[in-house]
Image (cartoon, grey):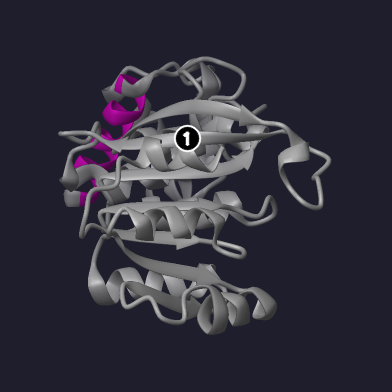
Amino acid sequence: MREKIVALLDVQQSQTVWEIGPGIGAITSLFLEQGANVTAFEIDHGFCRILGEQAFADEPTFRLIAGDALKTLPAQLAKEGSPDRLCGNLPYNVGSVVIAKVLESDYRPPVMVFTLQKEVVDRLCAHPQSKDWSSFSMLAQMDYEVKPAFSINSGAFYPPPKVTSSTVLFTLREQSLVPDHLRKTFLLVIRELFAQRRKTVKNNLLSGKIGAMVGKGGVESLLDASHVDPSARAEALVWDDFIALSESLSSCQAR
């Protein structure tokens, strides 16, 4: 399994690899063997002692950053910029939050590989108009091509989790699906439209920040200008619909 993960990342000598949750360093050791400069983000004190004082104490290209990756990773991105590769076996309770923090930032590593609960991977890789299609899918796919790589039996972990795990590959697009000038507005639009999946597009807009900004008449104007069906639900829309709404809202705000 670890060899397959390293192969997905296609690590080259002297590249920077950031690994979240390395545990005792089973995959970390392979990165170091390939000549990478590895930064490990680990929250567990016991694992930190093993990594820093035993396993890689004499490795000059290994660096340990102890603490919660939800805090340490964004801080390190702001300080150093994007690594060449980012990967991690992410805890099920915070995995999607860690990924969202990276995707919402201004830093985009060229290749990322994560092991997550299969349901999370299904959402990340979902196609438009499918049951798993969500704002999280769109957040992931606007800058990356996102593909499921392989599933992992629970017996591969200790202790074995009660859920199926999957590994997902992110490859940075040459050009984002969302223009830079619309990025902030687009993120607001997708969050609002998927806020309550059973509500219509119009009702989600009216009950959120956008409705508060532009009022009922403004929401109706946005829908008219973007040619989006007010009675549709968010999962029925495609990329062009969300872009059109974002363009309309951006134009409205600029007036």
> Which amino acid type corresponds to the residue marked 1 in the rendered image?
Lys
- Looking at the picture, how far across and down is residue 13, in whole percent? 22, 54
Is residue 171 shown above or below 66?
Answer: above
- Looking at the picture, how far across and down is residue 250, in whole percent? 23, 44
Q: Which residues are magenta?
A: 240-253
Left or right: residue 113 versus residue 111 is right
**Point 27% across, 27% down: residue:** 244
- Looking at the picture, how far across and down is residue 121, in whole percent? 57, 33
Left or right: residue 173 versus residue 217 is left
Is residue 44 shown above or below 1?
Answer: below
Residue placed under numbered mark 1 in the picture: 4
Corner quadrant of residue 252: top left
- 133 and 8: which is toward the camera: 8
- Looking at the picture, how far across and down is residue 245, in whole percent? 32, 31
Main secondary-structure element of the magenta-colored stretch: helix
Instruction: Check disc 1 and report its element: helix, strand or loop.
Output: helix
Left or right: residue 211 versus residue 45 is left
**Point 17% across, 50% down: residue:** 254
Corner quadrant of residue 73: bottom left
